[in-house]
Amino acid sequence: MDLHIEKLNEHHKNLSSSEKLEIQLNEFEKQLDLAIALHQQSIVFIHGVGKGVLKNEIHKKLNLKIKLNIIKSYYNDYSNLHGFGATEVFIR
């Protein structure tokens, strides 16, 4: 699931940084909830590298979901396809 703002909102140039982040995090939550409901084993979120703001916010949310036993784990390591710009979430 690509979370780059230009993939989520065609008017992204008119948005503030906080508005962009809110849209991206809402889409992250929506897609993760859908993956859980569909009993998927995993889902990959493409957040890019940039300054790491989106990745860090996603990882905070995922750490909470691990503590709440909602997901099993997540993995953000180098891949040939996305470099360090993607996180794979493993669902229970």
Image (cartoon, helix red, strand yellow):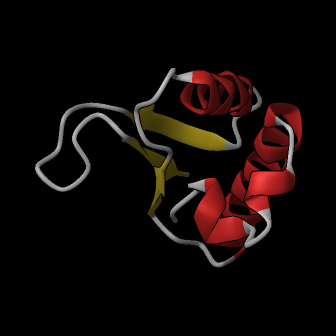
Residue at position x 77%, y 39% in the image: 21
**67 sits left or right of 76 in the view:** right
Q: Which quadrant of the view contains residue 67?
A: top right
Residue at position x 17%, y 44% in the image: 79
Towards the viewer: 65 or 8: 8
Towards the viewer: 18 or 86: 18
Q: Position of residue 51 (x, y in %)?
A: 51, 21
Q: Which quadrant of the view contains residue 69?
A: top right
Residue at position x 68%, y 21% in the image: 60
When the figure is inspected, residue 51 is found, relative to residue 75, above or below; the finding is above
Q: Position of residue 92 (x, y in %)?
A: 55, 52
When the figure is inspected, residue 42 is found, relative to residue 57, above or below; the finding is below
| Residue found at the very far left of the displayed protein | 80
**90 sits left or right of 34 in the view:** left
When the figure is inspected, residue 85 is found, relative to residue 9, above or below; the finding is above
Towards the viewer: 84 or 92: 84
Q: Which quadrant of the view contains residue 50?
A: top left
Q: Position of residue 70 (x, y in %)?
A: 70, 43
Q: Position of residue 73 (x, y in %)?
A: 48, 35
Residue at position x 25%, y 31% in the image: 77
| Residue found at the very far front of the displayed protein | 14
**15 sits left or right of 53 in the view:** right
Number of numbered discs overlaid on the protein picture = 0
